[in-house]
Image: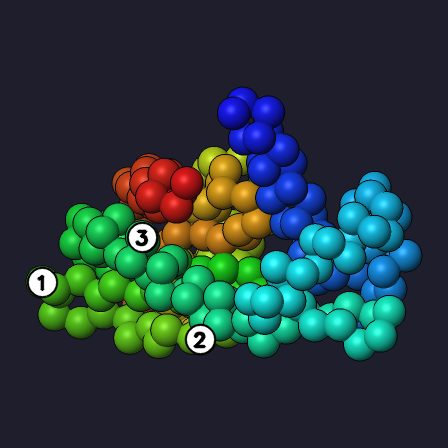
Amino acid sequence: MVGATKESSLTLERGLALLQAVAEAESEAPSISELATAIGASRAAVYRLLVPLQARGLVRREGSKVRLGLGVLRLASNVLPQLRMAANPALRELAEKVGATAHLTVADGTEAQAVAVVEPSWTAFHVAYRVGSRHPVHRGAAGKAISQPVETWVVSTGELQPNACGVAAPVRGVPGLRASVGVVALEKLDADVVGPHVVRAAEEVAAALK
């Protein structure tokens, strides 16, 4: 029984490695031989591993070439809603404590995209930050924090919107996710006060996603 469980685990690991190899291949559609080399398996093993992936629409074969299937898009479409659900409690607490619009921002290539936004309920005015908003990943506190190597906060003023002040911290420890949690306001934020709240919210989001 233990042997069968170990074999199933190994098969799953190889199947996931194969799917990742297809996604990350330098060529548009890697060949069976290239995939075998990438995951350290025989061509026969690759053919076997492709069968369940094809059945679920995660890959498709074109002769000896392999491409990602539309099933990957269906899976991907569920990622952002799940990110929002996991992040919203921490973002809500952060927005209410600080009195500023809180957001979860993820890296998408060279851009940073806001995927979850929560506005405070008690302020007279606040920044209206739209889900889906994009900006260069090297600009603004939210973008800069994504690449921050340590769990501390980044501050920016007027980089994305005149007079807007942002404080953000990286979300760390979630494999495959490059993201930050932050707040933005149309008035100067006291980073020494707001920063620790932002770092704590980023830690809570990371914990919710693990």
Q: Residue furthest top?
A: 2
Query: SS of the residue at dot 2?
Result: loop
Image position of 62 with respect to 81: above or below? below
Residues under labels 3 and 2: Cα distance? Answer: 19 Å
Q: Which residue is mark 3?
A: 86
Circles 3 and 2: CB atoms closer than 8 Å: no
Callout in the foreground (3, 2): 3
Amino acid, disc 3? Ala
Q: Which residue is mark 1?
A: 122
Q: What residue sits 55% from the left and 66% below the top?
A: 56
Sequence-wise, which precedes: disc 1 or disc 2?
A: 1
Sequence-wise, which precedes: disc 3 or disc 1?
A: 3
Sequence-wise, which precedes: disc 3 or disc 2?
A: 3
Q: What residue sits 59% from the left and 25% below the top?
A: 3
Residue 170 image position (x, y, % from top left): 48, 46
User: Image quarter for residue 39?
Assistant: top right
Q: What residue sits 62% from the left and 61% below the top?
A: 53
In which quadrant will I find the C terminus?
Answer: top left
Q: Residues within 10 Å of mark 2 (few under 14, many from 20)?
A: few
Evaluate whether residue 69 shows in this view. Answer: yes
Q: Which residue is mark 2?
A: 133
Amino acid, disc 1? Trp
Image position of 73 with respect to 140: above or below? below
